[in-house]
Image (cartoon, helix red, strand yellow):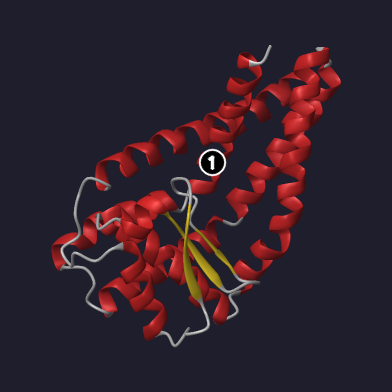
């Protein structure tokens, strides 16, 4: 592969994922300090939204980490990270609403979301391959493995870009649920939209974070 093309792929992948990571971190740090007017915790918000949509078969559990919140459609489980599960910040409210909205979209059989869920396992396998490739490349100094790792990460990057529409649909549905059930005030709407728009790019930003953590691990264990 031409070195210029490879460099461009690396720049696009790392550059944009880095930008979205900085933006997400900035918004997350700001709004986790701002309480929501309803004084509801994340788990209470998720419970209310699920109940209003007759999703009584969906369970909510607490998990470790930050912004690791997700919905498992196979097990019908909404997983909320500890700061979101217990928190009553505006950030906790929006993240919980979006995770619950993912369950609603799955119930309504959203095509884009079904496609994303179908391909996600493959993408996760490709992600693992790219990490192994990077480790081998760093250890052996082989350009061929570096090329492979960057190429695979670029494919992962494109996947997240192409599924942004599904993430945006979830954000829109979450805002709709929050307004419909009067879980936010008129004064909070603009801030909720800022958080929702930023959260739509969380998977792109997580790509940078994983790469950063991988290199940090390798440097510590040289």
Asked if 199 appears above or below 136 in the picture, the reply is below
Name which quarter of the figure residue 73 lies in.
Answer: bottom right
Q: Is residue 29 visible?
A: yes
Residue 37: x and y, percent? Answer: 15, 63
Q: Nearer the viewer, residue 84 or 191?
A: 84
At 48% from the left and 83% from the top, the residue drawn is 55
Q: Nearer the viewer, residue 25 or 191?
A: 25
Total tally of numbered discs in the picture: 1
Residue 129: x and y, percent? Answer: 79, 38
Asked if residue 137 lies left or right of residue 106, the reply is right
Quarter of the figure with the N terminus:
top right
Q: Nearer the viewer, residue 152 or 29?
A: 29
Name which quarter of the figure residue 85 lies in.
Answer: bottom left
Asked if 98 appears above or below 65 in the picture, the reply is below
Q: Nearer the viewer, residue 28 or 86?
A: 86
Asked if 53 appears above or below 197 in the picture, the reply is below
At 68% from the left and 66% from the top, the residue drawn is 115
Where is mark 1, residue-wise? 206
At 66% from the left and 16% from the top, the residue drawn is 221
Quarter of the figure with the C terminus:
top right
Asked if residue 11 lies left or right of residue 70, the reply is right
Q: Is residue 175 visible?
A: no
At 69% from the left and 37% from the top, the residue drawn is 154
Residue 121: x and y, percent? Answer: 73, 56
Tag 1's secondary structure? Answer: helix
Label 1 crowd (10 A; few <14 / some 14-19 / many >=20)? some
Residue 141: x and y, percent? Answer: 80, 12
């Amino acid at each position: 592969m031409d070195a210029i093309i490879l460099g461009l792929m690396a720049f696009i992948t790392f550059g944009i994922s880095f930008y979205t990571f900085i933006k997400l971190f900035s918004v997350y740090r700001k709004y986790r300090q701002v309480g929501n007017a309803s004084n509801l915790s994340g788990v209470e918000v998720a419970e209310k939204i699920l109940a209003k949509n007759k999703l009584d078969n969906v369970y909510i559990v607490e998990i470790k980490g930050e912004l690791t919140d997700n919905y498992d459609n196979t097990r019908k489980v909404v997983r909320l990270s500890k700061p979101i599960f217990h928190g009553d910040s505006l950030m906790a409210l929006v993240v919980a609403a979006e995770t619950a909205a993912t369950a609603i979209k799955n119930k309504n059989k959203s095509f884009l979301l079904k496609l994303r869920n179908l391909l996600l396992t493959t993408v996760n396998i490709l992600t693992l391959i790219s990490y192994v490739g990077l480790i081998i490349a760093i250890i052996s100094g082989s350009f061929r493995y570096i090329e492979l790792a960057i190429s695979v990460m670029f494919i992962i990057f494109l996947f997240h870009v192409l599924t942004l529409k599904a993430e945006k649909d979830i954000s829109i549905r979450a805002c709709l649920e929050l307004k419909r059930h009067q879980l936010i005030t008129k004064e909070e709407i603009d801030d909720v939209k800022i958080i929702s728009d930023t959260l739509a790019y969380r998977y792109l930003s997580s790509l940078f974070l994983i790469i950063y953590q991988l290199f940090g691990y390798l440097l510590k264990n040289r």
